[in-house]
Image (cartoon, rainbow, N blue to C red):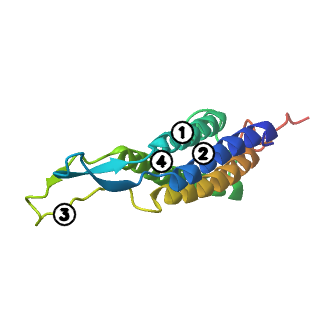
Amino acid sequence: MASKLLMLTIFVFDLIAFGLAIAAERRRSTAKVKQDGEGDYNYCVYDSDIATGFGVGAFLFLMLSQIILMVASRCFCCGKALRPGGSRACAVLLFIICWVAFFIAEVCLLAASVRNAYHTKYRISYLTTDKHLSCETLRKGVFAAGAAFIFFTSILSQFYYVTYAKARGGPMPYGSEAGVGMAAYK
């Protein structure tokens, strides 16, 4: 039987990660070109860098959720073998897909957080007017892609845990011996 407390805990952590990823998308850094006090140079001025913190927070909450799930399900590495059947096949398939979605979400969140924290330090003088100042910022949708994969990971991990618990529960079909029990002839 699947633990409802564990499923609720994983859902809450995934929900927090999703909310932080959406907040990071809404608050990612923007830049404006400003002139220095004397009017000789242009340079980039970036606004708040809070989206990086939101992205890292989403990264950590999603990782914590995945760690809790894998410890609870023993990550298919330890413990008794699962009962053969459709539940085991579904659990294995969902396990693999869940890890792929988790990896994509973590890569999106980490790359977006790093890219959002990067600020160019270039200055352009008015004497070199042939070059334009480029204030690089994070593209729209990278944190949102991470949030979408957090959502997929959350759904897949819930289904994985339920099918894992179903495949784990109950006695094994051939508990101790695979042969036919024989009694003494009387």
Q: Residue at x 18, y 50 (%)?
A: 123
Q: Do the numbered discs 4 and 3 sit on residues whose CB atoms are within 8 Å?
A: no
Q: Secondary structure at mark 4?
A: helix
- Nearest the camera: 141 or 169? 141
Separation of residues labelled 2 and 1 (CA atoms): 7 Å
Q: Secondary structure at mark 1?
A: helix
Q: Amino acid at mark 3?
A: His
Separation of residues labelled 4 and 3 (CA atoms): 34 Å
**Against 97, is 173 above or below?**
above
Q: Secondary structure at mark 3?
A: loop
Q: Amino acid at mark 4?
A: Glu
**Mark 4 vs 3, N-terminal side:** 4
**Mark 2 vs 1, N-terminal side:** 2
Residue annotated with mark 3: 132
**Mark 2 vs 3, N-terminal side:** 2
Q: Amino acid at mark 1?
A: Gly
Residue annotated with mark 2: 17
Q: Position of residue 170 (x, y in %)?
A: 80, 42
- Nearest the camera: 99 or 109? 109
Residue annotated with mark 1: 57
Q: Nearer the viewer's eye, disc 1 or disc 3?
A: 3
The residue at the far bottom in this view is 130
> Which quarter of the figure has residue 61?
top right
Q: Do the numbered discs 2 and 3 sit on residues whose CB atoms are within 8 Å?
A: no
- Nearest the camera: 122 or 175? 122
Q: Nearer the viewer's eye, disc 1 or disc 4?
A: 1
Kindly tell me whether residue 173 is visible in this rendering: no
Q: Nearer the viewer's eye, disc 4 or disc 3?
A: 3
Lateral position of residue 110 relative to residue 9, left or right? left
Q: Amino acid at mark 2?
A: Ala
Residue annotated with mark 4: 106
